[in-house]
Image (cartoon, rainbow, N blue to C red):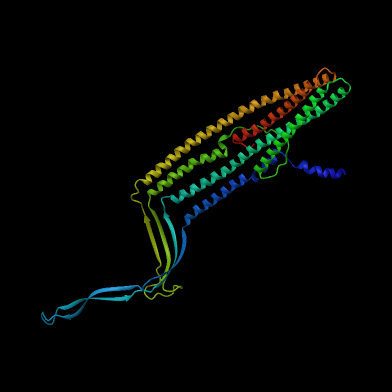
Amino acid sequence: MKMKKFVLIFPLLLSAENFNDIAKSITNSLNYKLAQKDVEIYEKKLKAARAKNYGTFDFSYTYVRLHDNPIMKMNMPAAIGAQNAGSAPVYPLIYKDMSAEFQAGEKNNFSGVLKYSYPLFTGFAITNLIKKSKIELMQKKLMLKNVKRVLLLNSANLYANIYALNAKIDALNKAKKAVIQAKEKAEAFYNEGLLNKSEVDEIDAKYYEIEAQIQNTVSQKKALLNSLSTLLNKKIEKIDGIDIPNLKKESIENRPDILAIKENLNLSDTFIKMAKSKNYPEIGIEVALKKEANNISLSRNNYQNRDKSYAALAMQYNIFDGGEKEANIEEAKLFKMKSMIYYQNYLNSALTDYKNDLLTLKALKEMYKSAKSEVRARLSYYEYIDAKFNEGLADSADLTDAIAKLAEARAKKEAVKSQIFFYTIKTNLDGGNSF
């Protein structure tokens, strides 16, 4: 029987998750997986941009049926005789306009082309397009790290609140136990005629009040556990205690979200270069194997040469666009200025949040010292009132009040401790470090 009890209890012990376990589960979050897909998408975009460096092979096959057979019309003067006037032996010829029609093709026409096109020069547009894709991919990778940072932050907040509720439940259960003991004493005093019935009822009322608080707190804890489970995409049934990490040195400029925003400065430089590339001509080559024929297999052409293969060099240059190129360049420059302002503003806000985190953490540590002292004082006062109650020198209202305030002080102390845990993690994460 003892072994069976061990088997039943041991899995429950294993189900408790400490925060290190929670942190390892972050990558299982659907939000994290969604951000991972963004990275994969931009990896493909970079691959597509690089492919432009290699040119393209294209194949086309067309069939055209004409309504009528192609006709070649010829109009030309033809000599039809000679005039009598003139000196022999040369006589002026007499001409007449003559016209003739010849079939120049068939109704059925087939064409097959295999061609290779390559951009020799694009004004560095392709080079900058690839650079743009690299920067965007880097941003997505940094944002993936930031998603993990935010998920850690949200998980730490939920974990801290669940811990505080666990502590509150524990404090209330201790209060409930103390009330039960007080009730047993009160009933004994009442049976001996040393206490009024109202005193017993007072303790009964406090018992049911504490029981209701326990049920309400348990419900709140279950709701937070559900939220944590949803966040991690993993069932969390219970959590372990808290281990407050060390506060690390600030390195806020290495925060992934700040680095991602900083990359906008590099991205804006690329936009400027891409806009300027329109000032250059575009030069490309095209080489093609081409056949035109009158049958599907492209093996017969009764009127022209089948082989129409060619090599071509083309240049395109815009002479006038109404000022569009200049407007695009100015737009890109303004985007860079905007990116610089946004980056500085974001960095300043992040630094302010970090400094405020430090102030909050400092205040919480002072509150924790006070909370520990309050617990000691409330415990001492409860023991004093309990002794007085045993002697008949304190009523049940005093005793239940002392029990309730001791439970409140115990819960508050652990709640403050949970906030120290959360704000230490928040300060580390906001400061550009791991938790």
Query: Looking at the image, how many numbered discs can be counted on the residues?
Result: 0
Q: Position of residue 229 (x, y in %)?
A: 68, 42
Q: Position of residue 227 (x, y in %)?
A: 66, 40
**What residue sits 16% from the left and 78% below the top?**
93
Q: Classify the position of the C terminus by image quarter.
A: top right
171 w.r.t. 318: above or below: above
**What residue sits 72% from the left and 41% below the top?**
237
**What residue sits 45% from the left and 62% below the top?**
116
Q: Is residue 140 visible?
A: yes
220 w.r.t. 279: above or below: above
Closer to the camera, 296 or 158?
158
**Taking 95 as reference, is 274 left or right?**
right
Farthest residue, direction right: 192
Closer to the camera, 163 or 179?
179
Farthest residue, direction top: 393
60 w.r.t. 257: above or below: below
Q: Position of residue 106 (x, y in %)?
A: 38, 74
Q: Position of residue 57 (x, y in %)?
A: 47, 61
**What residue sits 73% from the left and 36% below the top?**
218
**Taking 139 as reference, is 421 left or right?**
right
421 w.r.t. 391: above or below: below
Res 213 quadrant in image: top right
Res 245 quadrant in image: top right
Q: Is residue 380 visible?
A: no
Q: Classify the position of the N terminus by image quarter.
A: top right
